[in-house]
Image (spheres, rainbow, N blue to C red):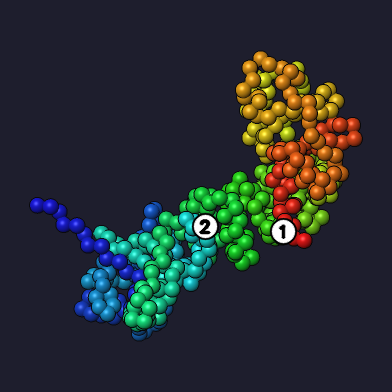
Amino acid sequence: MAAQTEPQVFLFLSEILGKSITGPEGRPLGKIVDLVATLAEPYPIVTEAMILPESGVRQPRMLRVPAVEEARPGFATASWDESDSRQPILRDNELFLKEALLDKQIVDTYGAKVRRVNDLQFLKARRSLHLVHVDVGFRGLMRRTGLEKAMDVFLRGFFDYTLPNQYISWKYVQPIASPDLLRLKIAQDRLSQLHPADLADIIEDLDIRQRSAVFQSLDVETAAETLEETDPKIQVSLIEDMDAAEASDIIEEMSLSEAADLLGDLSREKAEVILKEMEQEIAEDVKELLAHPEEEAGGLMTTAIIQLPPAWTVEEALAKIRAEAEDMDFIYYIYVIDEEERLLGMLSLKELLTAPAGTRLGDIMDQRVVSVSLDEDKDEIAEQFAKYGLLAIPVVNGEERIKGVIPFKNLLEIVAPHLGKK
């Protein structure tokens, strides 16, 4: 005989809040004002209800709920004594669902959007309530006001339309109401799965307090990638709010050109404190970039490049790339230089990978190098990119010594805001 499948029962928070709980022999215990859940994976489990007694000392109490059953129009428990209740104080990894989520903003990490929570949906399974969805749709609002059925009748009768449910699985939900929730590993894992550009959009949509809380919850690498995609004014507000040591760790992970742009936008005092906290070599590179105007070649370039002598072989060059790639902003080309760092030629990665291992770089380099001077303006640089179809252009000083490289992305960030303007 086949085992019976447990029926799936779904409940909404709006259907639970405000309902009465009765104890043995119908004794009234109070009204439910919130639910407490433990943040288990994959779905939080409701462990207690916060109830407000209907008589006597009206202080909220926490009541264990595994034995609570639905009993129209409220809920009932067949076994209860004083040991089943306690003061309304959260333990580690717990949250009040109404307080933390209802009418609050959350991050939908699947759709990469900030959404407002209108209701919560639970699945009753094995005598436990599991938080499975958040409701972000208009139907959730109507359910809470008691107008859901009336709305359905109206829409079907006049427009032959049924308002859809808009649920987000808890697996893709990141609460942002409390900084404590954002510091949990579950939050870091979910947020780090987003593309940095999506995370930047989300951060820009939040208010100042939430913005800082979300940003400071990210690991250093994700924070750096996200900061590079964020509006410069918001970059400044995020870093100004941070401890200098923590800010320096993030800025060190950014591309040199992006780091220089950000530090250039900060107050002088804040920038100097952060530079002192940074690794000396990185700080010196950033200071060199800060010495040039942002819209000239010196301000657009990065100094993180691979430059090698012509006598090196392809095999040696590839070993060098492997050793330094992790610390590079990008690697499109390698540049061949003489003893005084004068630019002799360049090779693309494709040319390097397809050449015999023992070939000298000087024998296969392209000597027709397109370069720009340190004070070249953005319009001339843009023309060079368009004319020669390069991914990056080297920057040289008056003695033809290579000082850095401008990746196309850096130029685009300066030019793009003006595209289409006359």
Q: Is residue 339 visible?
A: yes
Res 329 label: none
Instruction: Name the residue at the bottom extreme.
Output: 55
Res 112 label: 2
Q: Nearer the viewer, residue 111 or 249?
A: 111
Q: Residue 356 location in percent, x, y?
A: 63, 17
Q: Which residue is mark 1?
A: 420
Q: Is residue 395 above or below residue 77?
A: above
Q: Quadrant of residue 346?
A: top right
Q: Residue at horizontal 22%, vertical 71%?
A: 78
Q: Is residue 102 above or below residue 419?
A: below
Q: Residue 401 location in percent, x, y?
A: 85, 31
Q: Secondary structure at mark 1?
A: loop
Q: Secondary structure at mark 2?
A: loop
Q: Would you say 64 lies left or right of 170 here? A: left
Q: Residue at horizontal 86%, vertical 31%?
A: 400
Q: Is residue 53 visible?
A: no
Residue depth check, mark 2 versus mark 1: number of the one nearer the observer: 1
Q: Would you say 144 lies left or right of 220 here? A: left
Q: Amino acid at mark 2?
A: Ala
Q: Residue 411 location in percent, x, y?
A: 74, 47
Q: Are marks 2 and 1 in contact (CB under 8 Å)?
A: no
Q: Quadrant of residue 26?
A: bottom left
Q: Residue at horizontal 25%, vertical 62%?
A: 8
